[in-house]
């Protein structure tokens, strides 16, 4: 770790952290707090994905749908209207809408092959956005004068790295410049996330092998075909499986590459000073690495 002791962290002239864990446990909340109250530079991986790497895919999809309307088709063809994504740090709906859900087209679903193609686009974009992080650390300091930097990673970071590989290229690049911090949820948090997702299911990125297995299992139900799958029902069914799949990967990232804090500790933070103290405690209680 770049801060091998709590004192090294406290005395550092520049503090660089990457927050990871399940979506909904406070990564963006903490990042916003550090930016607003502590003068930290906030780098959002999902925002970078949705603007730099998948912005064109998202905009083209909007245009494809708009072209189905005769009036809009003519206006688009004559460059009379402009269609773009209004993605923000706090509103990533354009990205998740583009990812979509597999299943019946009359319920808004995508053919599974198209869905997997978009998943692969996201995988490549997420890796690129993560590898951009060191460059943004330098940009934040050189252009804007920010010494402190927080990387707000997406919940799927654990899907695009191998936390057990000491030479993993993405984790190696990140750990060389930032302290990786896992926000760990409890079973109660997991249950609440499942309930929240059940109310409003959203598209997510998953590893291809995990998705192929889940899709095959779901289609094994008697009389169910791809064209008859309810997209929301499938992603609801998949979500709880995904959380169980991700948990050991997050744990390995913290064990091999960083430290852990709990969602309860994050909820108790009242300002940047509390965050500094909490990370110092996390470094102190982390097991020694060989």
Image (tube, rainbow, N blue to C red):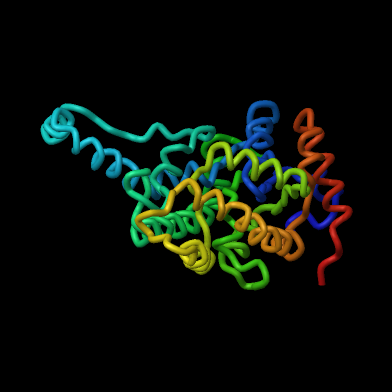
Relative placement, left or right, of 198 versus 77 is: right
Between 279 and 266, the residue placed more toward the observer is 266
| Residue 181 % position (x, y) | 72, 51
Rendered image quadrant of residue 144: top right
Rendered image quadrant of residue 58: top left
Relative placement, left or right, of 57 versus 14 is: left
| Residue 47 % position (x, y) | 49, 41
Residue shown at the point (58%, 46%) measured from the top left: 137
Quadrant containing the C terminus is bottom right
Residue shown at the point (29%, 39%) measured from the top left: 62
Between 138 and 169, the residue placed more toward the observer is 169
Q: Is residue 149 visible?
A: no
Residue shown at the point (27%, 32%) measured from the top left: 83
Between 276 and 67, the residue placed more toward the observer is 67
Q: Is residue 225 visible?
A: yes
From what the image shows, is residue 84 above or below residue 137?
above
Between 139 and 114, the residue placed more toward the observer is 114
């Amino acid at each position: 770790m770049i801060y091998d002791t709590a004192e090294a962290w406290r005395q550092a002239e520049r503090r660089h952290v990457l927050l990871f864990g399940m979506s909904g446990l406070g990564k963006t909340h903490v990042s916003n707090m550090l930016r607003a109250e502590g003068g930290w530079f906030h780098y959002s991986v999902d925002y970078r994905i949705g603007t730099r790497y998948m912005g064109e895919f998202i905009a083209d999809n909007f245009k494809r749908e708009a072209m189905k309307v005769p009036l809009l088709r003519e206006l688009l063809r004559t460059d009379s209207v402009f269609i773009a994504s209004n993605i923000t740090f706090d509103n990533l709906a354009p990205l998740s809408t583009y990812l979509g859900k597999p299943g019946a087209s009359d319920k808004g679903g995508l053919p599974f092959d198209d869905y997997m193609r978009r998943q692969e686009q996201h995988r490549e974009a997420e890796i690129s956005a993560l590898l951009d992080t060191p460059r943004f650390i330098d940009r934040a300091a050189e252009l804007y004068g920010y010494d402190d930097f927080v990387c707000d990673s997406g919940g799927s970071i654990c899907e695009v790295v191998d936390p057990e590989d000491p030479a993993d290229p993405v984790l190696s690049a990140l750990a060389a410049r930032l302290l990786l911090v896992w926000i760990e949820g409890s079973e109660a948090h997991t249950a609440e996330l499942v309930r929240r997702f059940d109310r409003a299911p959203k598209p997510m990125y998953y590893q291809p092998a995990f998705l192929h297995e889940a899709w095959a299992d779901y289609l094994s139900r008697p009389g169910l075909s791809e064209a008859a799958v309810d997209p929301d029902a499938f992603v609801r069914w998949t979500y709880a499986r995904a959380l169980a799949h991700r948990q050991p990967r997050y744990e390995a990232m913290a064990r091999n590459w960083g430290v852990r804090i709990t969602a309860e500790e994050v909820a108790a933070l009242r300002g940047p000073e509390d965050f500094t103290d909490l990370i110092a405690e996390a470094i102190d209680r982390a097991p020694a690495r060989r």
